[in-house]
Amino acid sequence: MFKDRVDAGRRLAEELASFAGGEGLVLAIPRGGVVVGFEVARRLNLMMDLIIPRKIGSPQNPEVAIGAVTQDGTAIIDQHLVSLLGVTRTELEEKKHDEMLEIRRRMELYGAGRTIRHYKGGQLILVDDGVATGHTMLAALRSARNYHPEELIVAIPVSPRDTLEVLKKEADRAVCLLVPECFYAVGQYYECFDQTEDIEVTEILEELQFKE
């Protein structure tokens, strides 16, 4: 159990201590993952930027994830579910397009993407406040692989075991603090799991860029 996202980030940083002061870059997933990622970056003296995957919801029920997409267009699609739900190619492309627009809006709102443009190698450490199905993290990992990092690391406070096993196949290293046998939701492993607001994400990015 974590007190809050700051506590989760501190504990993740302890597990990632070997990367302190190196050439690595933390890529955090908004919104909650930014608070965790900031604590990791601050304690390890690393730079941080954002990677923004978005869930692609079913046209019939947006809460049902049929995939995910990131800012560079990298997409993960659950073809079995798409077929089962009868989602057409046109519907899928429309949903993907809508999520790409929202990603671009958030990138501009947060002032994200400035640090990753200057990335020249080293480790990429992808951080979120936890994963459930893992669709968005999986899309983020495949997108991050396009930067050709020396080592691609997924760092999360909590994950169900089956999801973690999938992510391990995509990353070079996986750091996960809690792998409960009975997983219901990420928030159940935090004493405080309040929603992270856009203004907090923006302030964190501004503070990091000021330090540059």
Image (cartoon, rainbow, N blue to C red):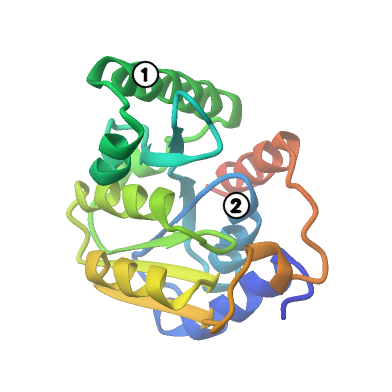
Which sits in the foreground, 189 or 127? 189
Point out residue 163 in the picture as x, y percentages from the top left corner.
40, 68
> Which residue is rendered at x = 52% and y = 82% of the image?
179
| 18 horizontally vs 179: left or right | left
- Picture quadrant of residue 149: bottom left
Residue 186 is left or right of residue 75, and the answer is right
Which residue is located at x 33 percent, y 75 percent? 165
Mark 2, Cα crowd under 10 Å, few <14 / some 14-19 / many 20+, is many
| Residue 88 against residue 168 in the figure, above or below | above
- Spatial CA distance of label 2 from label 1 is 24 Å
Give the numbered dot on residue 133. Answer: none
**What is the three-letter code of the residue carrying label 2?**
Val
Q: Where is residue 94, by image quadrant? A: top left
Q: Amino acid at mark 1?
A: His
Q: Is residue 124 above or below residue 80?
A: below
Whole-percent x, y for residue 113 in the image: 42, 35
Tell which of 208 and 32 is nearer to you.
32
Residue 34, numbered circle: 2
Residue to which mark 1 is pinned: 97
Q: Secondary structure at mark 2?
A: helix
Residue 53 visible: no
Give the residue drawn at x 22%, y 48%: 147
The spot of residue 166 in percent (x, y) is: 30, 68
Q: Is residue 164 above or below residue 47?
A: below
**Residue drawn at x 24%, y 51% as measured from the top left:** 120
Q: Is residue 157 above or below residue 79?
A: below
